[in-house]
Image: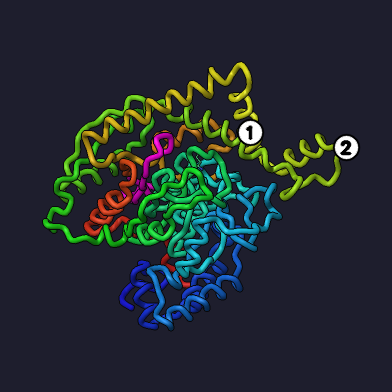
Amino acid sequence: MTSAPFFDAPVSALRRALDEKDISSVELASLFLDRIEAFDSGLNAFITVDRERALADARAADERIARKGTGALTGIPLAYKDVFCTEGMLTTCASKMLSNFVSPYDAHAVTLLKQAGTVNLGKTNMDECAMGSSSETSYYGPVKNPWNPAHVSGGSSGGSAAAVAARLAPIAAGSDTGGSVRQPAAFCGITGIKATYGLISRFGMIAYASSLDQAGVFGASASDCALLLSAMTGFDPRDSTSLDRPTENYAAAIEAPSPNPARPLDGLTIGVPDEFFSEGLGDETRAAIEQALAQYRALGASTRKIALPNARLAIPVCYVIAMAEASSNLSRFDGVRYGHRAAEYADLVDMYCKSRSEGFGAEVQRRILAGTFVLSHGYYDAYYLQAQKLRRLITEDFKRAFAECDLIAAPTAPVTAWPLGAMSDDPVQMYLADIYTTPVNLAGLPGLSHPCGFDTAGLPIGLQLIGDYFSESRLLAATHRFQQATDWHLRRPAIARTSA
Ligand code: GLN
């Protein structure tokens, strides 16, 4: 191997090392398991780590490698946000409600990744039921940011992002309902992409808000993300919103040679919405984004102003819809067939009340109540229906924008990772931090965040790229070109430079 240690090598280099027998999958898995053991107590990125299971996966992968039956990810370790059901393994959604739930089946994405020969290192920590922007509401305690453990990792997929940033896993899967892949990717200084709605099956992913939820992936670079994303997509009849379309090889797409290597992004038009640069955007974030846009222009892209006039409505619209859907989705957790059940109760209704009151944390209960309210008779039209109408306007803004540009660039979040606890008493303030990510979920579009700088406190800043439906290749390719010309994605927190 060349310069990078195995725990910090790109997935493509790990592939070569495995195929050339420089390292076995068992050795590679052990390396990451040892790192988790050594460093995760300081980060709390994982809820469940199953060494035996991981090593069994790795042994199976080594046999496949010996038979030369490998795909891009055979023998590569990864981690799953604890929203993905994994057969025979604890799947908690970071909630006391599911703290004893051993899933009897795999999520579709997990099935695909098993078939690809990946090694499951474990399940990562997150906001309870994926509700939050900081990974602090977990029943298992908050995730800490690898760049500064006094700060949040972002959320709700904060454990997956922190694990990749700290090199406790080379790649990881997450889910994004209103920003939960892109924002923690930004806060942890890594690359994360949320797919077009319908591209990755939601079967076996514990539902938060079904019309917004979509899986996504984390990696140190666009090329690592491309490999994982390619392996997770594909039609699944068990998800009625799964799209039946040919799968794409994103990794191959981003490696396509450019006719103009000096200006590989020639011809790409990047739209820059004024609305995403208004008040509330931190000065350092703004400066970093502007510098990144200059870099995109140097690579041949042109930038132009576009308008997304209704995007400012995205927070209330997204939260009304998300809470409404959550109140319905979470009604299945009643303590009857699985999950937490109160030890003592007077009758059936009392059992439901006590089990749900004990099983869910404050933020989840707040959302169930608000969601039930906006769906209730007399308020449905005023809130839920109104939100659906505004959702349509937000979606149409994007449609108009993509007639003028190929991609949209914006900050991922208005601020960098805040100190632990700083927003815990002010949920609305925390909701507002999702201002730039929620419009993308409402429209069902793919979105990516890649690192583009640091603030003066040394915390990472993310640039968000938004694409039209099914433009994952274009998003990843543009980011890949950016990353070939810059080194933000190569910066590591101290913990990721330390051997276990
Ligand atoms: N932060 C948003 C929320 O709390 C989005 C979370 C997510 O994408 N899962 O609902």
Identify which residue is drawn at 37% across, 28% down.
394
Residue denoted by label 2? 346
Q: How far from the left and from the top, in percent, is residue 391?
A: 43, 28
Helix, strand or loop for disc 1 = helix
Magenta-colored stretch includes residue 457? yes
Which residues make up the magenta segment? 441-463
Q: How far from the left and from the top, in percent, is residue 149?
A: 51, 53
Identify which residue is drawn at 23% across, 34% down.
403
- Direction from residue 27 to residue 443 in the image, left or right: left
Q: Quadrant of residue 348?
A: top right
Q: Is residue 422 visible?
A: no
**Mark 2, other Cα within 10 Å: few <14 / some 14–19 / many ≥20:** few
Give amino acid for label 1.
Answer: Ile
Spatial separation of the CA atoms under disc 1 and disc 2: 23 Å
Q: How far from the left and from the top, in percent, is residue 497?
A: 41, 67
244 or 281: nearer the viewer: 244
Q: Is residue 109 visible?
A: yes
Give amino acid for label 2.
Answer: Ala
Number of callouts: 2
- Direction from residue 177 to residue 96 in the image, left or right: right
- Direction from residue 203 to residue 497 in the image, left or right: left
Q: How far from the left and from the top, in percent, is residue 304?
A: 19, 35
419 or 28: nearer the viewer: 28
Helix, strand or loop for disc 2 = loop
Q: Is there CB contact under 8 Å for labels 1 and 2?
A: no
**Mark 1, other Cα within 10 Å: few <14 / some 14–19 / many ≥20:** many
Identify which residue is drawn at 38% across, 58% down.
230
Residue denoted by label 1? 368
